[in-house]
Image (cartoon, rainbow, N blue to C red):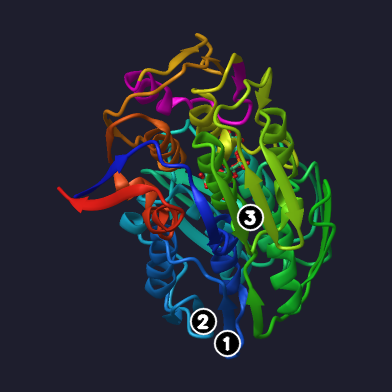
């Protein structure tokens, strides 16, 4: 086990480079399974995070040949040996549900263990399953497994009740080899979906419209190799912006796409943070104490990202005034609030677990706290950076899922943070 030892109070200053996007590389690693040719897929700017390690293990268990050195990865998937995903490997990462679309498209059948819920809510997958059935898949759910089959999927018009990111990705991948054209209406518009479209089109697919709420996929009969660079991780970038905001810092982020962070930039400016956009860089200069913002409402892209709700709550816990944080995307994503209140934050969560009322306090005090999930863990680190005294953050296995080297990046910016073995 490991933990962070943080001594708060340092203003973050300096420059840090943002790595590749977790939520882009994960569906892309599923999509490469569609490539039946012996051509290699070469991926660059691949983040070295735990979720990618797990996804590589899953692909190798299915017969993929993968070499991964530094941030580059070469993948061959002409000799896949199976379409059933190892249950132990799946249990640890619920987002593997989008393997269904890729394996169903490749083999005409797939077996996965039901991904179940996780720390941020029940996380149902009915939109995924309805989409695959609309394409002709027969589904059977028993003993905690989902088995889907269809000799050849047929394009369909699909309307998503909710713009689910994973369901949109699953349906895109299942549609690549389907007969005819598939239209996804009310599709999710996240930048990671545009990345998925771009790599699949480089491999020979015919997809249009990603980034809008209508995506069209014309079925093809084969794909080929491609080389592709993953987009920068907008959530890691946003996390660093919040860390600077919480510590009165003055930092520069390199290798970002400012357009992917509009909602975050606008909200931080409201909190009186100065932010300057320069091509693939962002300059964040924060005042000693933030101004509270009346509302932060999480919404599907391009709204304020739910993955930055916890880091924003931590940054606003020391603001001057009261902020209302409304979590509209997940049904239980305030696990960080309990730990923040132990540091002196004054936050009340409404009984419907959808709104946190944050009364900003002058100071937070260090404490021993535990990360309950990935983004709540990042929020607790931010609180530790802004608190007086020493904070111990346990539960780093959650943080390592989505951050390549959080302590290294923060230390480079002047934070007093160390990772120690317990
Ligand atoms: C993706 O999860 C991301 N994960 C999440 O990031 C992110 O928070 C989320 O999109 C929203 O942006 C990956 O890309 C690997 P959804 P996903 O389907 O696809 C409900 C992180 O921290 N829903 O858009 O699971 C669902 O319960 C992670 O990096 C249904 O009801 O998100 C949730 O309340 C966390 N039925 C809401 O929609 C369904 O069939 C959004 O889910 C599917 C989803």
Q: Can residue 135 be seen?
A: no
SS class, disc 2? strand
Task: Answer few, some or many: residues within 10 Å of disc 2's Cα (few below 14, many 20 plus, some between 14 and 19).
Answer: many
Quarter of the image holding residue 194?
Answer: bottom right
Residue at left offset 52%, top offset 27%: 313
327 or 262, which lies in front? 262
Quick check: is the Cβ at mark 1 less than 8 Å away from ligand 1?
Answer: no
Q: Marks 1 and 3: in contact by CB < 8 Å? A: no
Is 329 part of what is drawn in magenta?
A: yes
Task: Answer few, some or many: residues within 10 Å of disc 3's Cα (few below 14, many 20 plus, some between 14 and 19).
Answer: many
Residue at left offset 28%, top offset 35%: 391
Q: Marks 2 and 1: in contact by CB < 8 Å? A: yes
Above or below, 109 relative to 39 = above
SS class, disc 1? loop
30 or 277, which lies in front? 277
Label 3 belongs to which residue?
170
What is the CA distance from the residue labelled 3 to the residue labelled 2? 20 Å
**Res. 75 mark:** 2
What is the CA distance from the residue labelled 3 to the residue labelled 1? 22 Å
Task: Answer few, some or many: residues within 10 Å of disc 1's Cα (few below 14, many 20 plus, some between 14 and 19).
Answer: many
Residue at left offset 39%, top offset 36%: 9
Horizontal side of 401 relative to 269 (left or right) equals left
Outermost residue on the left side: it is: 422
The span picked out in magenta is 323-343
Q: Can residue 318 be seen?
A: yes
Label 1 belongs to which residue?
40
Is 293 part of what is drawn in magenta?
A: no
């Amino acid at each position: 086990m490991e933990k962070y030892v943080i001594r708060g109070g340092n203003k973050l200053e300096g420059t840090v480079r943002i790595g590749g996007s977790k939520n882009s590389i994960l569906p892309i690693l599923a999509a490469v399974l569609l490539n039946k040719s012996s051509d290699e897929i070469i991926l660059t700017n691949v983040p070295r995070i735990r979720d990618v390690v797990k996804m590589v293990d899953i692909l190798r268990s299915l017969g993929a040949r993968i070499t991964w050195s530094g941030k580059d990865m070469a993948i061959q998937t002409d000799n896949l040996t199976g379409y059933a995903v190892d249950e132990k490997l799946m249990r640890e990462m619920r987002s593997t549900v989008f393997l269904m679309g890729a394996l169903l498209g490749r083999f005409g059948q797939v077996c996965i263990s039901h991904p179940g819920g996780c720390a941020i809510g029940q996380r149902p997958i009915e939109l995924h399953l309805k989409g695959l059935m609309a394409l002709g898949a027969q589904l059977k759910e028993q003993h905690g497994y989902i088995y889907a089959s269809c000799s050849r999927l047929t394009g369909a018009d699909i309307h998503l009740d909710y713009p689910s990111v994973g369901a949109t990705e699953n349906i895109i991948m299942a549609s690549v080899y389907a007969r005819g054209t598939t239209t996804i209406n009310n599709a999710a518009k996240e930048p990671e979906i545009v990345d998925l479209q771009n790599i699949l089109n480089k491999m020979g697919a015919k997809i249009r419209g990603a980034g809008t709420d209508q995506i069209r996929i014309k079925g093809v009969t084969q794909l080929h190799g491609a080389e592709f660079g993953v987009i920068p991780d907008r959530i890691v970038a946003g996390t660093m912006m919040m860390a600077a905001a919480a510590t009165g810092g003055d930092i520069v982020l390199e290798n970002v796409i400012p357009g992917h962070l509009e909602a975050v930039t606008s909200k931080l400016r409201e909190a009186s943070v100065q932010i300057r956009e320069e091509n693939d860089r962002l300059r964040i200069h924060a005042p000693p104490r933030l101004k509270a913002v009346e509302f932060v409402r999480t919404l599907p892209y391009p709204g304020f990202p739910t993955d930055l709700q916890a880091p924003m709550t931590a940054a606003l816990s020391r603001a001057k005034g009261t902020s209302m944080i409304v979590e509209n995307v997940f049904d239980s994503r305030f696990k960080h609030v309990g730990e923040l209140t132990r540091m002196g934050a004054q936050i009340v969560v409404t009984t419907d677990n959808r709104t946190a009322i944050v009364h900003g306090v002058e100071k937070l005090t260090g404490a021993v706290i535990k990360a309950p999930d990935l983004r709540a863990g990042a929020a607790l680190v931010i609180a530790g950076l802004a608190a007086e005294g020493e904070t111990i953050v346990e539960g780093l296995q959650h943080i390592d899922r989505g951050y390549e080297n959080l302590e290294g990046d923060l230390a480079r910016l002047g934070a007093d943070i160390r990772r120690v073995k317990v």
